[in-house]
Amino acid sequence: SRGSPRGSPGTAAQALGLEMAAAPPEPLTVAFVTPEYARVTSTGGLGVYLMHLAEALAARQGLEVHVLAPLWAQGARGEWMAEELLRKHPHAGWRVLRFTVDAGGATPAIASLNSGSVRGVHLHLLRCSGHFEGAPYAGFGLGGAAAFAPAA
């Protein structure tokens, strides 16, 4: 046909009178790194605010939302967070990746990254021996920050 060289990509579609649709765009990835997240552990406004923001963004078409937070050993009320997490969100499709973190101590810390999806938000929760052991923020200092940074 005129104006379209033989064998070019749109020729068959044009001959049939079809329009070619553009491929859908890749989703934009948004990531938050936070010391608390309300669906898992929260001591106040920051965790609640971030949960609402992340879930609202995840509900928008074309956005993929990730949250990286520590999985504290105990919640603010003393509950054990790993058990609480599985009880609250059994269908999140949790996956666990185990690794070591050298935070400058004599022995590298054993850590795990627990990942799952809750209400459209991809949660990545870091557990680390020697860090995030008690309730949120209990004893959290430079060592906790050093363990948290490589996972981010």
Image (cartoon, rainbow, N blue to C red):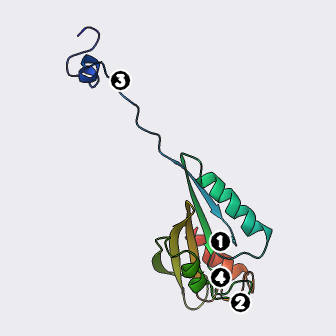
Of badges 4 and 3, the one in the foreground is: 3
Q: Distance between the residues labelled 4 and 1?
A: 13 Å
Q: Distance between the residues labelled 2 and 3?
A: 61 Å
Task: Report the front residue among 76 and 67.
Answer: 76
- Contact? badges 4 and 3 (CB < 8 Å): no
Q: Mark 2 points at which residue?
A: 78
Q: Distance between the residues labelled 2 and 4?
A: 10 Å
Q: What residue type is labelled 3?
A: Glu
Can residue 2 be seen at all in this image of the molecule?
A: yes
The disc at residue 72 is: 4
Q: Mark 3 points at which residue?
A: 19
Report which quarter residue 1 is drawn in.
top left
- Contact? badges 3 and 1 (CB < 8 Å): no
Q: Which amino acid does label 2 sit on?
A: Gly
The disc at residue 11 is: none
The local secondary structure at tag 4 comes to loop
Q: Name the residue under label 1.
A: 39
Q: What residue type is labelled 4?
A: Trp
Q: Which amino acid does label 1 sit on?
A: Arg
- Name the residue located 58 percent from the left edge and 88 percent from the top edge: 129
Badge 3: residue crowd in 10 Å (few <14, some 14–19, many ≥20) = few
Between disc 4 and disc 1, whose residue precedes? 1
Of badges 2 and 4, the one in the foreground is: 2
Please provide percent x and percent y for residue 39.
65, 71
- Name the residue located 67 percent from the left edge and 88 percent from the top edge: 79
The local secondary structure at tag 2 comes to loop
The local secondary structure at tag 1 comes to loop
Q: How far apart are marks 2 and 1 (CA)?
A: 16 Å
Please provide percent x and percent y for residue 83.
57, 86
The local secondary structure at tag 3 comes to loop
Between disc 2 and disc 3, whose residue precedes? 3
Between disc 4 and disc 3, whose residue precedes? 3
